[in-house]
């Protein structure tokens, strides 16, 4: 075997080795939803669609579904299972119910994932992505008479760290307490003398299954003062959620058997706080209350004491005293005039 043939074979072996090395290393791990994680998104299915549109996925990449065990799961399904939000008979592989969960993209084309918890998929916890194959490797040099030395330069593979994943375009609102009244909520007219407030429950989050659990609405309540006559504005989509006033026992157990009044199923909804004391509200959709869609707040009586009474008008001196003080100068003037006239008369009589 000639020296030139040996070097040509060596060049091909180096190129193939570099290609396999690149395929084995240059994979990316994507945290689904980035900081939002894998949950029922506040903005519906468009949240994960927007996230997927900002990323390019190739075979071998890894999806990391960040969720709390017992609250969500993840299943890869067919397109029919994705469209119908139904995993029965349409699951690819097993359902992963321990979070966080990692799934390696093993096939090109459209890949579909859903949460199998009741109504979570229909509320937007679903992901569809397009996966492509790896890029075509560079061809080996055609010149078989290459000079001695490495035929192919070393391949430098830049593996981005996990934290380098660009942030999703959706901005997740903070759960910090907000102003007393949302500017987008129309004020409620009131005929009482007291100035009442309208509170948009959860502010921009609205009335939904909160990503942070029950602490989201507990945080929202903190720092607010609710008075009798104030209004709660529950912003939700009809058919997705409900509002029900319940007893403390119903609130603690998330039970629909302790409802005060009727269940409100049409959103958005307004509830007027008509009595003092503790008030409790839940969503009656299955598992929504257990996942944190519940609200407890304390209502106090409004300031019923009227504005300063007109009694201040009685504080001035009685009307009878006022005229006497004002008429005194007149009587003094008349007396002075009489004395002056008498003096003048005496003088005139004297000179005459």
Image (cartoon, rainbow, N blue to C red):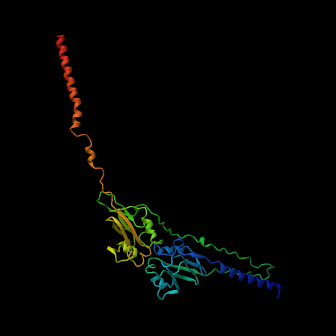
- The image shows residue 257, relative to residue 176, as above or below, that is below
Q: Is residue 94 left or right of residue 323?
A: right
Percent position of residue 166, x then y = 57, 70
245 left or right of 63? left
Image-based side of 84 in relation to 150, left or right: left
In the image, residue 43 sits, relative to residue 134, either above or below, namely: above
**Residue 279: image x %, image y %?**
36, 68
Evaluate whether residue 88 shows in this view. Answer: yes
The quarter of the rendered structure image containing the N terminus is: bottom right
**Residue ranking furthest to the right:** 2
In this view of the protein, can residue 246 be seen by the observer? no
Q: Quadrant of residue 62?
A: bottom right
Please state which of residues 186 and 257 is positioned toward the viewer in this rendering. Answer: 257
Report the residue that reaches farthest toward the front.
249
Closer-to-camera residue (3/17): 17
Q: Quadrant of the C terminus?
A: top left
Front residue of 196/104: it is: 196
Image point (42%, 65%), residue name:
221
User: How many numbered callouts?
Assistant: 0
Residue 186 is left or right of residue 21, and the answer is left
Q: What residue sits 30% from the left and 60% below the top?
A: 190
Horizontal and vertical percent position of residue 246: 35, 73
């Amino acid at each position: 075997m000639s020296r030139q043939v040996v070097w040509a074979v060596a060049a091909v072996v180096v190129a193939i080795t570099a290609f396999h090395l690149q395929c084995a290393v240059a994979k990316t791990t994507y945290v689904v939803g980035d900081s939002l994680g894998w949950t029922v998104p506040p903005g519906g299915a468009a949240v994960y669609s927007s996230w997927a549109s900002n990323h390019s996925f190739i075979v071998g990449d890894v999806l990391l579904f960040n969720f709390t065990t017992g609250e969500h799961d993840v299943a890869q399904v067919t397109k029919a299972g994705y469209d119908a939000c139904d995993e029965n008979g349409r699951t690819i592989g097993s359902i992963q119910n321990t979070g966080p969960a990692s799934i390696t993209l093993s096939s090109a084309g459209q890949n579909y994932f859903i949460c199998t918890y009741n109504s979570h998929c229909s509320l937007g916890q679903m992901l569809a992505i397009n996966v492509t194959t790896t890029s075509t490797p560079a061809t080996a040099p055609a010149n078989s008479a290459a000079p001695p030395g490495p035929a192919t330069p070393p391949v430098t593979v830049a593996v981005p760290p996990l934290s380098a994943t660009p942030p999703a375009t959706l901005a997740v609102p903070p759960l910090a307490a907000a102003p007393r009244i949302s500017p987008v909520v129309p004020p409620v007219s009131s005929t009482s003398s007291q100035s009442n407030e309208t509170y948009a429950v959860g502010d921009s989050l609205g009335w939904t299954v909160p990503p942070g659990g029950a602490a989201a609405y507990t945080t929202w309540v903190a720092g607010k003062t609710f008075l009798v006559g104030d209004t709660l504005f529950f912003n939700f989509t009809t058919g997705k959620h409900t509002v029900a006033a319940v007893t403390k026992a119903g609130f603690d157990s998330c039970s629909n058997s302790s409802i005060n009044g009727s269940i409100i199923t049409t959103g958005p909804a307004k509830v007027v706080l008509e009595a003092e004391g503790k008030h409790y509200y839940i969503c009656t959709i299955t598992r929504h209350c257990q996942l944190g869609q519940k609200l407890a707040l304390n209502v106090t009586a409004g300031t019923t004491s009227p504005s300063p009474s007109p009694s201040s008008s009685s504080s001035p001196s009685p009307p009878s005293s006022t005229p006497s003080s004002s008429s005194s100068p007149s009587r003094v003037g008349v007396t002075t005039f009489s004395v002056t006239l008498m003096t003048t008369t005496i003088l005139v009589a004297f000179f005459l």
